[in-house]
Amino acid sequence: MIICEHCGQIIGDDERYCPHCGMRVDSARVVPVHQARRKMVWFIFPALLALIFSTLLYRFYSTSRLEIAPTHIKFFKYGGEDIIEIDYDGFTWKVDKSPKWLELNTHDRRLLITALPNLTGQTRRDSIVVSSGSHHATAYVSQLGAATFLRLTQSTDTAYAVGDTISITYDSDGLAPVLTLPDYCHEISRSNDEIFIAISPNDSDRMRRARIILTEDTCSATAMFIQPKAPPTTPDEDN
């Protein structure tokens, strides 16, 4: 038995024309059935191995579950940090989408998030999309564009008559409150939550009472300080 080179049908060894397609059979080019079947086996076997390997590979890399927590994160105007926990049963995960005002770092099953300060004056709203295999999960993020509170830890202070340096400590979710001072005071420096103020000597003939005002956006806080007048000098002190 041989195989017709034109239509691939099995025909007799002595056939000069194929009874199926009617084409002339070239005896020099025909392939015996047993050789054709052997070639077919060598072709099918690698294809079957490739199919098995690709199936196993897909099952190894595929994900049937992907969950993240939390799914809603809110940042204050000054920024801040947070962590998203990634729970999945796949081989790996990745971040597909994130806003530019967030800095992300991946660590095992955690996504570390750092929000940059919001200087736009508007509330930001966006999302982070995480994927593993064909599964996706979304965390919604927002950031306030204005301070919501501003508080001072002390409301009064006293300065020396000969001049002094005082400090005020505040608590706020804003960035940098504006300081308003009387003309005989000036700001020296500030840290994250503390401002140092220099007060010049009181050369007047009465006690000074003044307000220190902090403002940011719609928030404000006020502290009072007093500075006694300088004591009168004696003749011995003048000499």
Image: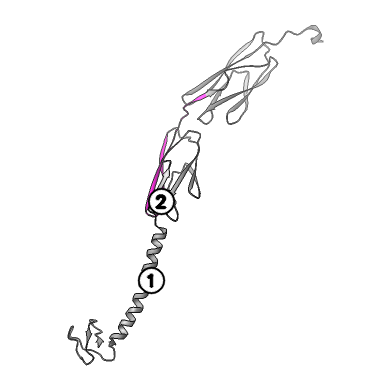
Please state which of residues 35 and 25 is positioned toward the viewer in this rendering: 35
Residue 73 horizontal side relative to residue 181, left or right: left
Residue at (72% x, 9% y) in the render: 231
Please state which of residues 10 and 185 is positioned toward the viewer in this rendering: 10
Q: Nearer the viewer, mark 2 or mark 1?
A: 1
Up/down of 125 relative to 158, above or below: below
Residue at label 2?
131
Mark 2 touching mark 1, by CB under 8 A?
A: no
Residue 129 lies within the magenta run:
yes
Q: Quadrant of residue 10?
A: bottom left
Counting from the top left corner in percent of width and height, residue 186 is at 62, 23
Q: Main secondary structure of the magenta part?
A: strand
Please provide the residue range marked out in magenta: 123-150
Up/down of 117 relative to 180, above or below: below
Residue 140 horizontal side relative to residue 158, left or right: left
Counting from the top left corner in percent of width and height, residue 129 is at 41, 47
Residue at (38% x, 70% y) in the render: 50
Q: Quadrant of the N terminus?
A: bottom left
Residue at label 1?
49
Q: Amino acid at mark 1?
A: Leu
